Image (cartoon, rainbow, N blue to C red):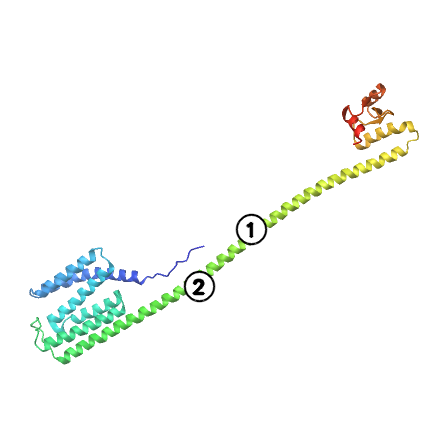
């Protein structure tokens, strides 16, 4: 079964790293064009040095393998610094508003919407301080072709930046919050799926264990039945043998009962026992009056007949099985 991940990682962090990498590459390409245009389009000034220095810092930041926080912080500082430089160069009229809004947007995307609000506050503070210094003639705009404006122009320009900043930061805030909620819902769904998978695996394991136990019980039952069957076969064979013996004994009894002469009784018994019980040789011994010898009295085989003619006898208690049986009666 496929393994579910422990956490859903979209990873907003990965997205930020990719976005910053793409931003640095794009800024390096288009920044070169902007620096060239600035150098060729106006006489040499301190701001040309600032722009070239900012671009070189951006290029180094793009190339060097430094941590995310250093890259993001440096990029924000460069963007915000260019906004401040624009304020000092052209006041409310120049491209400082673009750089300020870019810094606010990057702060919200690369860090969080709270950082975006912080940069919004810094931007408004920069406009207030710069406007106060310029309008009070404490500080002069370096570009001679731009007028300082008045408090109304500075107020409307700052308000426009603030309005766009609020829209940007609030939009990013709502997007990030909804994303976090979606990620939480996805994590809850993942946890439910993991619980369902664990429950299913537990049921499968329990069922497998039950089947293994049942299989072992059936195997044991089969072995028991096999042993019982073998025992029954042995008992059946024994009973069959005993039945055959009883039948043979009954036939022997009938045959003996049919004997008319007492002299034929023992030979008849020897012959019938041999025939019915399947013995090759059957001999009948009688103990003599002195209880000293067991004398062969009847036999069915030719060898037994020769032993009869010789008067074959065995000493009781000393010679062979017959002698011992005759002695102890067992």
Q: Which residue is more in the foreground, 175 or 300? A: 300
Q: Residue furthest top?
A: 310
Q: What kind of element bears circle 2?
A: helix
Left or right, 245 with respect to 182, comes to right
57 lies above or below 142: above
Q: Residues within 10 Å of mark 2 (few under 14, many from 20)?
A: few
Left or right, 192 with respect to 84, comes to right
Q: Position of residue 69 (x, y in %)?
A: 24, 61
Q: Residue at x 24, y 60 (%)?
A: 68
Left or right, 122 with respect to 207, comes to left
How many marks are shown on the rendered structure? 2
Going from N to C along the chain, the mark reached first, 2 or 1, is 2
Q: Position of residue 191 (x, y in %)?
A: 42, 62
**Label placed on residue 212:** 1
Q: Could you tell me how far apart the alpha carbons at marks 2 and 1 are, in whole angstroms?
A: 30 Å
Q: Residue at x 63, y 48 (%)?
A: 221
Kindly identify which residue carries mark 2: 192
**Label placed on residue 183:** none
Question: Based on the displayed image, in which of its 4 quarters is residue 270 positioned?
Answer: top right
Q: Residue at x 28, y 70 (%)?
A: 172
Q: Which residue is more in the foreground, 193 or 275? A: 275
Q: Position of residue 148 (x, y in %)?
A: 10, 76
Q: Residue at x 88, y 33 (%)?
A: 256
Question: Based on the displayed image, in which of its 4 quarters is residue 115 positioned?
Answer: bottom left
Q: What kind of element bears circle 1?
A: helix
Question: Based on the displayed image, in which of its 4 quarters is residue 276 positioned?
Answer: top right
259 lies above or below 200: above
């Amino acid at each position: 079964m496929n393994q579910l991940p422990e956490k859903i990682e979209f990873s907003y962090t990965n997205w930020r790293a990719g976005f910053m990498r793409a931003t640095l590459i794009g800024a390096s390409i288009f920044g070169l064009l902007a620096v060239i245009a600035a150098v060729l389009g106006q006489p040499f000034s301190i701001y040309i040095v600032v722009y070239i220095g900012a671009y070189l810092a951006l290029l180094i930041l793009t190339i060097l393998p430094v941590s995310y926080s250093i890259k993001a912080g440096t990029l924000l500082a460069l963007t915000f610094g260019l906004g401040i430089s624009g304020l000092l160069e052209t006041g409310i009229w120049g491209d400082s508003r673009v750089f300020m809004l870019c810094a606010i947007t990057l702060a919200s995307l690369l860090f969080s919407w709270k950082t975006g609000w912080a940069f919004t506050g810094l931007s408004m503070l920069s406009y207030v301080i710069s406007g106060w210094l310029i309008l009070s003639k404490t500080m002069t705009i370096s570009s001679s072709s731009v007028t300082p404006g008045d408090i109304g122009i500075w107020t409307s320009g700052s308000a426009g930046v603030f309005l766009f900043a609020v829209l940007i930061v609030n939009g990013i805030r709502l997007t990030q919050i909804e994303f976090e909620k979606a990620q939480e819902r996805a994590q809850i769904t993942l946890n439910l799926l993991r619980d369902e998978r664990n429950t299913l695996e537990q049921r499968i394991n329990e069922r497998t264990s039950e089947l293994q136990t049942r299989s072992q019980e059936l195997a044991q039952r089969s072995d028991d039945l096999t042993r019982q069957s073998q025992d029954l076969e042995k008992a059946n064979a024994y009973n069959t043998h005993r039945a055959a013996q009883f039948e043979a004994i009954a036939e022997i009894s009938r045959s003996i009962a049919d004997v008319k002469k007492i002299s034929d009784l023992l030979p008849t018994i020897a012959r019938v026992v041999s025939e019915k019980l399947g013995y090759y040789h059957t001999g009948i011994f009688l103990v003599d009056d002195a209880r000293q010898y067991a004398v062969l009295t009847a036999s069915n085989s030719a060898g037994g007949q020769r032993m009869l003619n010789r008067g074959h006898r065995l000493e009781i208690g000393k010679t062979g099985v017959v002698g011992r049986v005759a002695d102890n009666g067992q």
